[in-house]
Amino acid sequence: MKQRLRVLGERNFRWFLLGQSASQLGDMMAPVALAFAVLGLTGSAADLGLVLIARTVPLIAFMLLGGVLADRLPRTAVMIGADLARLACQGVMAALLLTGHAQVWMLAALQFVHGGASALFTPAVSGLIRETVGTESLQDANALRGFAQSAAYVAGPALAGLLVATAGAGWAIAVDAATFAASAAFLGLLRLPAKPLPATRMLRDLAEGWREFRARRWVWSFIGAASLVNMWQAALHVLGPVAATAALGGAGAWGLILACFGAGSIAGGALALAVKPVHPLRTAVCWDLVFPLQLLLLALGAPAAGVAAVAFLGGVSLMVSNTLWETTLQRHIPEDRLSRVSSYEWLGSYAGYPLGLLLVPALHTGLGLHNALWVAFLCQLLPSLALLLVRDVRDIGAVPAEPEPRRTGT
């Protein structure tokens, strides 16, 4: 294990990881704080949906632009700018809530800017990891980042709930804003080689990123399958609480299931430090086959303890698969095009889920709870099974034929 943690000796990666830990804690606090902020104003689920849509639309619309900018400009500059924009959005929102001047349209407008800033930030992350550690340490770096993300998944909602209950949603949003300030400060401490501005135009860069994405079957196959898996994950988030209320014991049982998923993702982060397969995507897909079991047990009417157990395994599978995928992408895609390719990954992930949120309630209405869960289980399982038929996914190695030289500062 000590050897796996050696990557923490890299100065630039330490600052990056600290910044990401702060940012991800805020990201996990935000949904709880935002929900209670809106509901505290109007009590309207429709208003909450409007604010969430206002945040999601620019996140999808500007994702490819974020990938282009992250490959053209210094990634730290792009990410710091995005953090400062989100700091401003959440800071203004906190002030409006705390002074009693907030209105729903104001919150929606601020979340629109927040979503656009997140679209610029997100594709830069994979490329920046590649800049801060050597090729041989990429999986360890991704696993540690995943571990921090999992810890935030557990701690963030709990901290937000505590702040909302004791001090109000405005203060929870204020703490979220502070996490972006911390992220920007840590990113400012990175010392990386200067990146020359490309002579090409942005549209040409965008087209080049598309060619890079399209040229690798293992990339677009995996991203396409992941988009479908994410789309049907909406069934767990929408129908899971319905099933828990009907047969598992209500909110307490559903809270236990979510907590077990978070604990599993933390365990998966630790496991990802140790797993070093020769064919990483083959292993990642095999772990992905575990993920739909949560829907299966809900469809079978299993008790809460059984669903919680597979939720734990689902958390493990998600973290191991994500770590292996990110590492493979970073090792095989040229560094100067990595953020553009990563932006297609994030676009697929974000675009699929809202479609699921629209489709799943219709299935529930038309088929009933258990039949809808069965459909969702099969639709989430089949894309991963299909990936095992793609030779490029099965056979890609952990290390490229000609690894690039190490690029890091200590």
Image: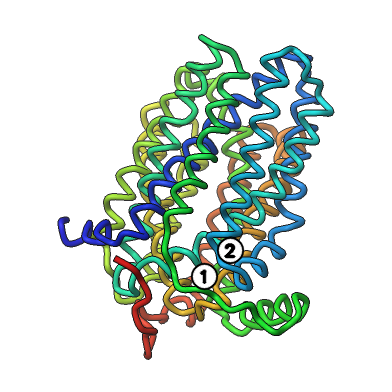
Q: Which residue is mark 1?
A: 387
Asked whether disc 2 touches disc 1, contact meaning CB atoms under 8 Å apart, the reply is yes
- In depth, the one of 354 and 270 nearer the eye is 270
* Quadrant that contains the C terminus: bottom left
- Mark 2, other Cα within 10 Å: few <14 / some 14–19 / many ≥20: many
Give the image location of residue 94, x and y in percent: 65, 24
Tell me the number on the disc at residue 345.
Answer: none
Of callouts 2 and 1, the N-terminal one:
2
- When the figure is inspected, residue 123 is found, relative to residue 231, above or below; the finding is below
- When the figure is inspected, residue 72 is found, relative to residue 175, above or below; the finding is below
Dot 1 lies on which element?
helix
- In depth, the one of 325 and 20 nearer the eye is 20
The residue at the point 41 percent across, 30 percent down is 155
For residue 3, which quarter of the picture? Answer: bottom left
Tell me the number on the disc at residue 225.
Answer: 2
- In depth, the one of 308 and 67 nearer the eye is 67
Question: Left or right: where does residue 369 sit relative to residue 43?
Answer: left
Amino acid type, label 2:
Ala
Give the image location of residue 204, x and y in percent: 75, 81
- In depth, the one of 33 and 329 nearer the eye is 33
Give the image location of residue 186, x and y in percent: 44, 48
